Image (cartoon, helix red, strand yellow):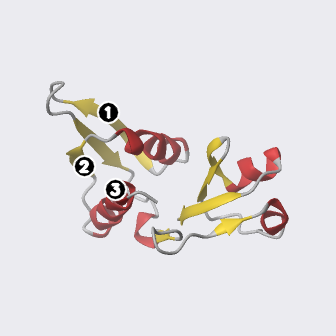
């Protein structure tokens, strides 16, 4: 996982632990897909771009009960966790949100099961 994506996840978790519902960080292309995934799952209230072309910022609004305090980073640059489809069929945690990086893009565990593919587990909430 890229260093700036780890930075995003750590910043999200820290904001949640500090009870900060709003914060900004410098724009990165890699952030957008992850933020969209979290928004679709109800973890974020909203997110958007602010600033000019030279200094774009991402403004993030967290839900008050977002579960990010339980965020666990599964794969890092030195430790990568791949799960095959056969491993995912035994994965039954219904209340957890797990993000996978696959050949079809970023998918949840349910999305991987539907497409019958595995991938690199990035994080869980």
Q: Give how far across and how far down residue 12 sits, in percent.
A: 34, 59
Q: Nearer the viewer, mark 1 or mark 2?
A: 1
Q: Quadrant of residue 92?
A: bottom right
Along the line of sight, which residue is nearer the eye, 66 or 3?
Answer: 3
Horizontal relation, residue 32 to residue 41: left or right: left
Q: Secondary structure at mark 3?
A: helix
Precedes in sequence: disc 3 or disc 2? 3
Identify the disc placed on residue 22: 2
Q: Give how far across and how far down residue 111 sits, in percent.
A: 72, 47
Along the line of sight, which residue is nearer the eye, 19 or 100?
Answer: 100
Precedes in sequence: disc 1 or disc 3? 3
Give me the C-alpha separation between circle 1 and circle 2: 12 Å
Q: Give how far across and how far down residue 113 sits, in percent.
A: 79, 53
Along the line of sight, which residue is nearer the eye, 45 or 90?
Answer: 90
Residue 41, placed above or below residue 93: above
Number of marks in the rendered image: 3
Question: Residue at point 32% right, 33% down?
Answer: 48
- Outermost residue, top direction? 53
Give me the C-alpha separation between circle 1 and circle 3: 15 Å
Can you identify the residue that label 3 sits on?
8
Question: Residue at point 84% right, 64% down?
Answer: 89
Q: Give how far across and how far down residue 37 sits, in percent.
A: 52, 44
Question: Residue at point 22% right, 49% down?
Answer: 23
Tags 1 and 2 touching, CB below 8 Å: no
Q: Secondary structure at mark 1?
A: strand
Q: Quadrant of residue 46?
A: top left
Q: Nearer the viewer, mark 3 or mark 2?
A: 3
Identify the disc placed on residue 58: none
Question: Residue at point 34% right, 56% down?
Answer: 8
Q: Nearer the viewer, mark 1 or mark 3?
A: 3
Can you identify the residue that label 1 sits on?
48
């Amino acid at each position: 996982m890229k260093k700036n994506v780890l930075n995003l996840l750590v910043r999200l978790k820290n904001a949640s632990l500090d009870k900060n519902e709003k914060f900004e960080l410098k724009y990165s292309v890699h952030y957008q897909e992850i933020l969209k995934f979290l928004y679709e799952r109800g973890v974020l209230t909203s997110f958007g771009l602010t600033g000019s072309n030279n200094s774009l910022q991402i403004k993030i609004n967290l839900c008050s009960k977002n579960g990010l305090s339980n965020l666990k980073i599964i794969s890092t640059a030195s430790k990568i966790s791949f799960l095959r489809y056969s491993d995912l069929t035994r994965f039954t945690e219904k209340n957890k949100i797990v993000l996978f990086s696959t050949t079809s893009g970023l998918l949840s565990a349910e999305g991987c099961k539907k497409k019958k593919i595995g991938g690199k587990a990035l994080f869980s909430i």
